[in-house]
Amino acid sequence: MTQENYYEPRYISQSNNNSVNFYFGEKNNKKTLYESIFEFDKIVLLGNPGIGKTKELENLFEVLWREHEATGLIPFSINLKNFRPINEFKDLIKYEDWKSLSNIIFILDGLDEIAEIQDFISAFEIFVSKNNLLNIKYVISCRTNIYEKYLVNISNFKTFFLDNLMLDQAKSILNEKYKINLDLISIDDKHRNYLQTPFFLNLFAEYYLKNQKPPQSDSEMWEKYIEKTIEENKSKNIKKKVINNVKLIKNLKKVAFVNELMQKNFSTEDELDTILGENHLEFIENPF
């Protein structure tokens, strides 16, 4: 297994209680998403941005596909950002003869990336109802705040939350992916948030490898990440016009602020035009 492909087993809970003891987390009574799909046919997986929902679904698909001859369960992975109000849910299924399969699981990523969530839910519940006699399982992911904002309620689905990383899990990821021994680094409680989600853990690792010390603040780590991403984009687009870093970062802040207020993780072109004016066409090409 390559460093980049390393996967650390994660756990899910029926309550959103991520105050689990980071340093001495107990795994004995925890269940994985893989274990839970054989107990529950319909699951909604919730979690905050960066906690690793997409990676968890990708791993679930890969494991089920490897084991499909033994389990008889055929996984279908679907990215929900491709859904449009004019669609039916079945339009997202690329295999036309899916009904001929005896045992199916649809793994649906990104309910929060759909502009018209209620339209999707209506179409989805019609599909589930029409095919309730077939052996179909479902897993669907969504950001917790979007799920709560829209008061999402998908009939007969069990809600689970993806747990934060515990200390031993963070140590394993740092060691396996980056060859970083966390026991040799001086960290304190202010670093705890960096280690509890894969996104921030990766930022922490990249910062440490470059600077040989842990970040002292969120802003310090974010600034380095943004600078690195902009420079990488410059190298890929060296023949294009020069990127104005100051202007790009200023516009990023505007868009991030508006999306946070609206509790969205994307902006349409019309919305970008409203926020940024004629600058939005240049902004669309940015690496974020």
Image (spheres, rainbow, N blue to C red):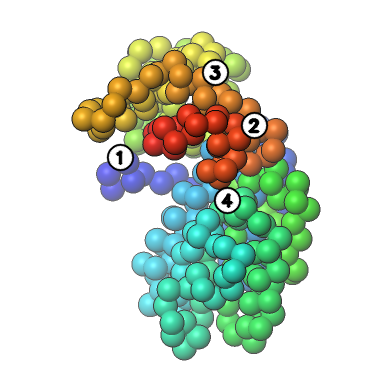
For marks 1 and 3 on the same chain, the one whose residue lies earlier in the sequence: 1
For residue 3, the mark is 1
Label ID, residue 218: 3
Q: Is residue 2 left or right of residue 155?
A: left
Give the residue at mark 2.
258
> For residue 121, which numbered disc appears in the image?
none
Query: Against 16, is 171 above or below?
Result: above
Pointer 2 and pointer 4: residues touching (CB < 8 Å)?
no
Q: Nearer the viewer, residue 124 or 258?
A: 258
Q: Residues within 10 Å of mark 3 (few under 14, many from 20)?
A: some
State whether residue 160 is above or below residue 182. below
Of helix, strand and loop, which one carries label 1?
A: loop
Instruction: Determine the CA span between mark 1 and mark 2.
Output: 36 Å
Type of the residue with mark 3? Asp
Residue 128, percent from left and from top? 65, 76
Asked which secondary structure carries label 4, the reply is helix
Q: Which one is nearer the viewer's eye here, 128 or 233? A: 233
Q: Nearer the viewer, residue 130 or 198?
A: 130
Q: Which of the two labelled residues, at mark 1 and mark 2, occupies the earlier sequence position?
A: 1
- Front tag of 2 and 4: 2
